[in-house]
Image (cartoon, rainbow, N blue to C red):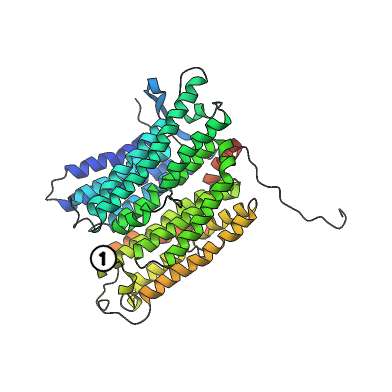
Amino acid sequence: MKIGWLTLTLLLPLVGALATIAVPKAKALLSKQVALVFSLVTLALTIVIAVGYHQNGAADYEENHTWIKAFGAHYALGLDGVGIVLVVLTALLTPIVLIASWNDAKTGRWSEKSFFAWILGLEALSIGVFSATDVFLFYVLFEATLIPMYFLIGGFGGPQRSYAAVKFLLYSLLGGLLMLASVVGLYVVSAKNGGDPSYLLTDLVKVDMSQNTERWLFLGFFFAFAVKAPMVPFHTWLPDAAAEATPGTSVLLVGILDKIGTFGMIRFCLGLFPEASRWATPVVLVLALISVLYGALVAIGQTDIKRLIAYTSISHFGFIVMGIFALTSQGLTGSTLYMFNHGLSTAALFLVAGYLISRRGSARIADYGGVEKVAPVLAGTFLFAGLSSLALPGLSPFISEFMVLAGTFSKHKVIAVIAVLGIVLAALYILIMYQRLMTGPVRDGIEKLKDLNFREVFAIAPLVVLIIGFGIYPKPVVDIIKPAVESTMQRVGVTDPAPQVPATEGQK
């Protein structure tokens, strides 16, 4: 079997994980270096794939091989504009996390090399999830991503890491169980349409199903993705997991793994169940709006830095889901762009917060004050990451948030107007946090706080450059996303509202 580009991209981090584990335990530094090299090679290959991607709305770099013939399952991969953006994000964040987490695994239950190997394993599985064009393969990889994340949280997290890891696993398994029921349902429906059953997306979009069947199958997929996203009321696992995980693990969890939920809504909920998606839109938009406001309000009252950032992400994911189910091209394009930009801004915020916490030994906001006087680079970087998170104009999240709100407003004005409150609340939770942490008199224990070192600045620098760069010129990413969005809109059977042009004097 010829190895395709996507298979090679998926295999590289897996081989890297095995190579990292194979390094003798006494050579911890070498194991880190091996992991970093494999992640950088994967990033380079991903960039080559992105540069060669054909922007035509259809899947590119396709591979298709029969896997389990009796089930109609295939090893099928391919990238559309949504998938390639998230694959690039995954490949980009992995080496950044490895560099930023260089010394974070020393106090874990297991060896440092296992920490780095699990990260590479998660990267490989995530690339597979974003590339899968067979529903059964997607489901297998979707569930497999839980394994490395469970061990990253449970093996290297804080004092309550076991509780957080188990809670994460149980919520995810419950969602996965309901998805499995829908996956089985798709097999039955596919088999009844005559011919051999198939889990290929290209075959399933041609399958006729009754309205009730489509809606029930939609609910199984949507529930699993709502847990993963995470949306209120299925969100409670995230603050515990993010608070107990290492900062790098939190970046992978919120920046990559949770994006599987919103990615799945686009590819599977909209792609396979168009009528059910239109039917569910009013309820989903209300849940998304609740997530936006609830996440922001609860973030304001947090006393733990990492829990606060986790709640901000719940609010941000509310915006992403809102843009998806607004069912407009601008909203859907903005949501996909939001997924990418949120990964950049939240990675920067979690990593700088992790630098701060590792120096002080506490995540309590009350234990800080006056940091900007003793560590100005750290404080400045934290402020930049925070301003990015609140979508300051000129930084990349602003473009995507504006597109989501504009796209939603064109069809659902009341939802969009209320959602604007989330922007106001974002300014409050970020600026209040910065004020309490960084300004005012220097508190006891802060006097000797060290500023960022070269390795830490080197890890954050690419994020800063990209946030500014795509804030000024987002066109390259938008151009990749648009054809896939147009294809999805056509599949769902919706169009953008016609612009309302005021009548001229002559027309009156």
Q: Position of residue 451 (x, y in %)?
A: 29, 71
- In the shown orientation, is residue 500 left or right of residue 28? right
Q: Relative to 492, say whether 190 is above or below.
A: above
Residue 374 appears in the figure: yes
Judged from this view, the residue extending furthest toward the bottom is 441
Quarter containing the N terminus = top left
Residue 5 in sight: no
Kindly identify which residue carries mark 1: 358
Q: From the viewer's side, name the closer residue of 240 and 7.
A: 240
Q: Nearer the viewer, residue 225 or 352?
A: 225
Task: Give the amino acid at mark 1.
Answer: Ser
Q: Percent position (x, y) of residue 253? A: 35, 51
For the C terminus, the image quarter is bottom right
| In the depicted structure, whether residue 414 falls above or below residue 276 | below
Find residue 498 and report its horizontal and vertical position in percent: 71, 47
Q: Residue furthest top?
A: 195
Q: Is residue 349 left or right of residue 13?
A: right
